[in-house]
Structures are given as C-alpha cells and as structure tokens.
Amino acid sequence: MKATPARTISVFLSQHARVRLALLLSAPLFWLGLVYIAALAALLVTAFWTVDSFTGQVQTTWTLDNIITVFTGSLYQAVTLRTVGVALLVTIIDIIVALPIAFFMAKVASPRLQRILVIAVLMPLWASYLVKVYAWRSALSQGGIVEWLVTPFGGTSPGYGLPATIITLSYLWLPYVILPIYAGLERVPNSLLEASSDLGAKTWRTMRSVVLPMLWPAIIAGSIFSFSLSLGDYITVNIVGGANQLLGNLVFTNVGAANNLPLAAAIALIPIGIMIVYLGVARRTGALNSL
Amino acid sequence: MRLSRVARVTLGTITALILAVVYMPLFVVFVNSFSTSTSLTWPPPGFTLEWWGRAFRNAGALEGVTTSLQIALASTAIALVLGTLVSLALQRHTFFGRDSVSLLVILPIALPGIVTGIALNNAFRTILDVRLGVLTIIVAHATFCIVTVFNNVIARLRRMGTSLEEASADLGAGVWTTFRLVTFPQLRSALLAGGLLAFALSFDEIIVTTFTAGAGVTTLPIWILDNLFRPSQAPIVNVIAVMLVFVSIVPIYFAQRLAGAEQLQK
C-alpha cells in the first residue's frame, strides 16, 4: 500500500490512542471551557466589582459591597426564601403527580397504550414554553376557563399570583419529572413485585419497601430538573405571577433596566450555590447516572 | 404485580385526569384563537377566522420565525459536532478527569437558565466587549444544546460496542474510513434524535435568549413575549401558539418512528 500523507496520519492515529483522544476532546473542551467555565469564572469575579454611578460603566475596583448587600439585604433574603419555597413546592407537586402516572404507564398499561401515553406526555414538552405559560394565563384570567369550571362548585379561581406561578411551573416541568421516573420504573423487574406480593405484602407495602427504594435515584434525577428550572425562571412569574418577584427577576432587572451587572452577578451566586449543594447531594445518591 | 381491580381503575383514572389537566390549557388556546373576544373570556362569545388571516400577514412574527430558524439550525450544527466528539472521547477512552468532563457537558442545562444567561451576558459585554446579536445567541444556544446530542450519541455508542470498528480496522480501514463507513451509519438515527431535540430546545428558548440577544434581534419567543400583553396582538399570539403546537407534532412523529424502528431491530 502506498504511503500517502492521509494514510500516514491514519496509521499514526490508530497507533496513538492518546493523540486520538486529544483531537476528540480539544474542540468540545475549548468550547465548554472557554465559553462556559470562563464565563462562570468571570461572573464570580464581576460580583466583586462595582458600577460607576455617573457613567454606568463597570469599574474593576475590588469590593465586597455587592456580596454584603445580597446576603444581608432583607429584600434579597425574602426573595431567596420565596424562590426556594416555590422551587421546592413545584418539585414536590411534580413528584406526587408523576408517580401514579409513571406507574400506570410502566406497570399497568398494555404495550400499545404505553406508547400512546409516552407520546401524550411528550407532546406538551415539545409545545413552546411561552405557549404553555400563555395558556395558563388564558385559563386563569378573569372570566377564564378555570373560573368557569370551579365557580359552579363554589370555588374561586386563584387568579394571577404565587399560586398561579406554582401551578404553571409544575405544569411546565411535569414531563421532565415523569420521564426519568417512568424509565426508573421500567428498570424495576416485575418478578420482584410478584415476589413481594407472594411473600404477603399488600400493594402499599410493596410500593414502600420495594419500588420506592429502587426508584429513589430516578426521583432525585427528575427533581434536579424541576428544582433547577424553577429556581432560574423569571418569565413565568412575569406572565402569571402578578407583582411577585423571584430571584430571576432581580437578576434580570439589574442586568437590564438598572444596569448593575456586578450586583446581578452577586445575586446569581445564590442559585449557583443552592444548585451546587443540590447536585452534591444528588450525586451521593447516584442520581446523576440516571439523568 | 397482581394489582387489585380497584387499584388499576384508580391509577387509570388518575392518569386520565392528569392528562386532561395537561391538555386543558392548550385546548383553551386553540379555541381562543377563533374567538371574537380579545380578552380571553370563557366560553368565547363567537367565532371568527380573522386572527388566522392576520397572523400570516404579520411581518414581526414572520421575521421572528426566520431568525429563530437560523439560530436553531446554526446552534444544532455546532452541538452535533461537539456533542459527537465529546461522546466519542468519553465512551471510547478512559482518562483522568473523565467524570469532570461529563459534568461539564451537563452543567449548562443543570444550572438555572438565569445563571447561564447572566454569565454569558457578562462575558460578552464586560470581558470580551462583543456586541450582542444573532451570533451571541447562537454561541449560548449551542452551549446548552451539546448535552442533548451527547446523551443520545453516548447511549448509542454504549450499545454498539467496538467489535465492528475493530473488524474494520483489522480489514485495513484507516481511522477516518472506519468512522465514515462503520461508526457514522450506526450513529445516524441517534444524531437525528439528538439534533431534533437540540433544534426544538433552541427554537423555543427564551430565558438565556433574553440575556444574549441585542436590542435589534427578535426571535419568535421574544416576539411572543413582547406581544403577550398587548390586547390588540393577543389573539394573533393565540394563533402562533396553536401553529407551534401543530408544528411540534412533526418532530415527535419522527422521534417515535425512530424509536419504533430501533425496537424492531432489537
């Protein structure tokens, strides 16, 4: 065989796995490292800078002011608590709603129905985010369908506000929670469930002692999505949340209208810190492998 | 498990109820797009096709669609290349720091959207001094789209094994020939599935986009957000919303067909 340059390179590459690896990794690492990690690091640094109140330019003088403002200001504490509360509630609601539907899909439905249900759950996931938030705005509006549905039963529509935000966010992230739990349930062998009932366990006991322990990593994996996505959302609360603000709104206002990037960076450190803790805990349960 | 009849019926009812709640808001938008009222009241006082006609002539919405398509295509292309490279590296090699690399790929989607948004906004504006625009949106979208390609491709590589590639190398094929004739054909449907997801993710993204779009750039989601609160435009937003839902059926159909074809192969 002739030793063309292409051939020489090919032979060299097939003999040197490390060089092959370096070539494969260089572009993605360059991108993720340069674009993302550098940007995150820069964000951390910017949080210690300040803004000239006359020119609006970022000044590179070091100060702890932003950090102190964010961690001691009562506004920031209240908004952080509200945001974490909303994210936790959304996550809990999603898990409670996802468990029965995922169980029905994985263990009760016939294979045909199973495929239809997977599509039915996936469909809203592909529908636009804004469409879904807007849909809830329509449904919860004054004289909207929710009011029309609950008024005959003596209920009242929650209208726009924090409850509407929680409903909408739970709705948005529900498929992200259903799918990992469904995948996790598929991995629980039916024989195990039968063994449990042969040994005399009732349905509830089997769920608690057999299914739940095996499902735990899948549940945590699903919760990462709903928690993180809720933590960083500011558009939903703008559209259905009335006058309420979440952390995302504070960040967005400071980047845009208030033009105070350093303060926005300092506020953004709060969700980063919360997610690092959350991911750290999730990692110990082995949930990251079921993402 | 031998579930009692009552338990089965209960689970089935809960599932049906949840799905009803899931589809109710989308149904409301669909019906409202034909409503003669602009104030989202239910039930609609009358029906008209006026908004559908107007939506197709709305220059702002059409421009938004074009911009979003361009951005989604470009960021999907970047994500396909980078996602494939990184999954080949992680699946076919063992090296120090492998776990960190896989965490790095997941991070842009695991961290809240505002974090990714403000980090990139800050990097572009204060550190690099780049003007925000279509290019900065593409960079941002490609960054969080890598993970969807990565997930699909690495799952496929895991199932493929290496025996076919080894056979190809034993028969004298070079690294590139093996990739082109053996590895790539096996990856094709995984790339399509990952690419579709990346495309949908980018086309729909709003949070990171608002941080990385300059003043002059209007993607479709930005257009929707701008017009959501204008009473005169709200019915047109309904129409666009309905169209988006119907257009999104196409990728689901393809994704499901791919999944179905794979089950037949097994």
Image (cartoon, coloured by chain):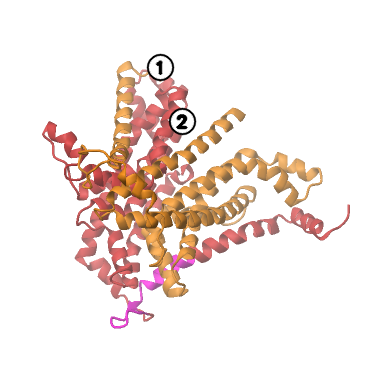
Chain colours: A red, B orange
Residue B58's label in the rendered image is none
Which residue type does callout 2 highlight?
A: Glu
Q: Chain of mark 1?
A: A
Image-based side of A147 in relation to B247, left or right = left
Q: Does the CB distance between marks 2 and 1 fall below 8 Å?
A: no
Which residue type does callout 1 highlight?
A: Asp
Residue that badge 1 annotates? A198
Give the image location of residue A216, x and y in percent: 39, 38
Residue A186's label in the rendered image is 2
User: Which one is earlier in the sequence, the residue at label 2 or at label 1?
Assistant: 2
At 31% across and 58% down in the image, what residue appears?
A: B226
- Which of the pair B51/A36 is nearer the observer? B51
Same chain for mark 2 and mark 1? The answer is: yes
* Quadrant hosting residue B79: bottom right
Residue B112 seen from this side: no
Q: Chain of mark 2?
A: A
Vertical relation: B219 (above or below) A258: above
